[in-house]
């Protein structure tokens, strides 16, 4: 899909000096609408704030590019008395390991330096929530904090957050407000007393334009095959795709289901799925060019989405709805999307078979989450102007 932005999103750096009313943002991913779902969420938030004429400044962080630099910096952080003092003062419950001490000490120094040098508003928009020390540092030097987690890091099997769920929730609780991408995570944080709100993913303008083109083309395109779309280089995505293929093969081989279907499998790294596709009806394409991807989207009967485990919310689902493509998704994959018209959820392979056999109508365009968007804008304006 051609997702090149019509107006590139750029954030000013900390140097030269930023305008005195600029809000400091700590983005998790690059501003790339052609990138993965994480980047698109970051673009969504920044586009929304820029439309509200809120000036933003990019928090610059030190990048340790060599193993030697990482080793020396880690040792320095562990030996720095400020690290232990910071942990004790904030009652941080971290693991008793050199890795945890080094991570905590290094992040404390990074945020202290960057926040101290910022010349704009005393508000931090904190997206990189795996760096759990940020709100403690920010609060100590007079900042307000709005957290925008992409997911609860401690719930990810590959968790590189270094710490526990309790530590992460306590850190998010230090923020003045938290805006979650998933309803389930909003519920969890509220249950723990965190001031959390729901800001669903809604595609940024450049993506919306491209999805509208796909929707229009689908009005006159014949639809015969299902589509599995994703990046199989991501382990949770890969495991979900493998189980999905196994369920589809089980449907094929079960006499009681007379479901005749063909499936295209598209995305980076999907070539490794070929060995699981040992029955007719599956075609693995791997990564494809934009024009070819658009052709798959325009002709797909539905997009099949499956996850064995996961947190956050899949940006792919609202994007497919906006493109006019029905989505058949496992119950875990369609979290936070149960209410969307055009999303059909299943718990097991038998329910999946039932949806495969039905003619699914083109879903209506998702309404913009105006109230949720305005809530974020109002919080940012209020805290950016607070003394």
Image (spheres, grey):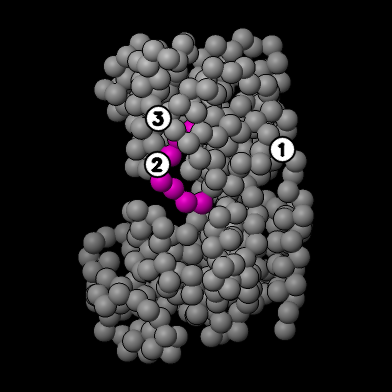
What percent of the width, then of the height, locates residue 162? 34, 66
Q: Earlier in the sequence, mark 2 or mark 1?
A: 2
Residue highlighted by disc 3: 244
Q: Which residues are magenta?
A: 305-312
Q: CA distance from mark 1 to mark 3?
A: 26 Å
CB-based contact (under 8 Å), mark 3 and mark 2: no
Is residue 37 on the magenta stretch?
A: no
Report the mark closest to the observer, 2 or 1.
Answer: 2
**Quadrant of the image containing the N terminus:** top right
What percent of the width, then of the height, locates residue 118? 58, 75
Give above or below for 81 relative to 375. Answer: below
Mark identifier at residue 184:
none
Task: Provide the secondary structure element on which disc 3 rests.
Answer: helix
Report whether 84 appears left or right of 24. left
Task: Locate residue 7: give its quadrant.
Answer: top right
Task: Provide the secondary structure element on which disc 1 rests.
Answer: loop
Q: Which residue is depicted at the point 72% across and 68% down?
A: 379
What percent of the width, then of the height, locates residue 216? 71, 20
Is residue 307 on the magenta stretch?
A: yes
Report whether 91 appears left or right of 23. left
Categorize mark 2 by other alpha carbons within 10 Å: few (<14), some (14-19), many (20+): some
Task: Provide the secondary structure element on which disc 2 rests.
Answer: loop
Q: Earlier in the sequence, mark 3 or mark 2?
A: 3
Q: Is residue 275 visible?
A: yes
Q: CA distance from mark 3 to mark 2?
A: 9 Å
Nearer to me, 110 or 105:
105
Q: Which residue is depicted at the point 75% across and 41% down?
A: 367
Q: Is residue 57 visible?
A: no
Categorize mark 3 by other alpha carbons within 10 Å: few (<14), some (14-19), many (20+): many
């Amino acid at each position: 899909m051609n997702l090149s932005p019509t107006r590139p999103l750029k954030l000013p750096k900390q140097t030269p000096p930023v305008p005195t009313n600029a809000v400091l943002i700590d983005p998790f991913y690059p501003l790339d609408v052609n990138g993965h779902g994480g980047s698109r969420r970051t673009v969504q938030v920044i586009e929304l704030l820029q439309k509200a004429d809120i000036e933003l400044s990019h928090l610059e962080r030190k990048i340790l590019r060599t193993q030697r630099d990482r080793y020396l910096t880690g040792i320095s952080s562990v030996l720095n008395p400020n690290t232990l003092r910071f942990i004790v003062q904030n009652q941080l419950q971290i693991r008793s390991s050199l890795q945890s001490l080094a991570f905590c000490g290094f992040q404390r120094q990074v945020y202290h330096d960057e926040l101290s040098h910022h010349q704009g508003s005393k508000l931090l928009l904190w997206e990189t929530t795996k760096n759990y020390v940020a709100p403690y540092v920010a609060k100590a030097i007079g900042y307000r904090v709005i957290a925008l987690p992409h997911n609860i890091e401690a719930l990810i099997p590959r968790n590189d957050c270094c710490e526990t769920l309790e530590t992460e929730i306590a850190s998010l609780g230090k923020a003045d407000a938290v805006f979650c991408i998933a309803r389930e995570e909003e519920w969890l944080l509220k249950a723990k007393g965190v001031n959390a709100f729901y800001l669903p993913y809604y595609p940024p303008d450049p993506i919306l334009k491209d999805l509208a083109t796909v929707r229009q083309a689908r009005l006159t395109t014949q639809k015969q095959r299902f589509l599995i779309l994703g990046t199989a280089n991501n382990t949770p995505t890969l495991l979900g795709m493998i189980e999905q293929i196994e369920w589809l093969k089980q449907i094929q081989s079960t006499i009681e289901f007379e479901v005749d279907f063909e499936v295209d499998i598209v995305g980076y790294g999907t070539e490794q799925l070929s060995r699981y596709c040992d029955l007719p009806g599956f075609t693995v394409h791997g990564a494809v060019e934009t024009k070819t991807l658009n052709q798959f989207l325009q002709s797909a009967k539905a997009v099949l989405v499956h996850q064995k485990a996961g947190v956050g919310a899949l940006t792919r689902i609202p994007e497919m709805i906006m493109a006019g493509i029905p989505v058949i998704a496992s119950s875990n994959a369609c979290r936070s999307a149960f209410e969307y018209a055009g999303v059909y959820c299943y718990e097991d392979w038998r329910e999946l078979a039932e949806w495969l056999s039905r003619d699914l109508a083109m879903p209506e365009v998702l309404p913009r989450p105006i109230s949720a968007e305005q809530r974020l804008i109002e919080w940012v304006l209020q805290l950016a102007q607070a003394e």
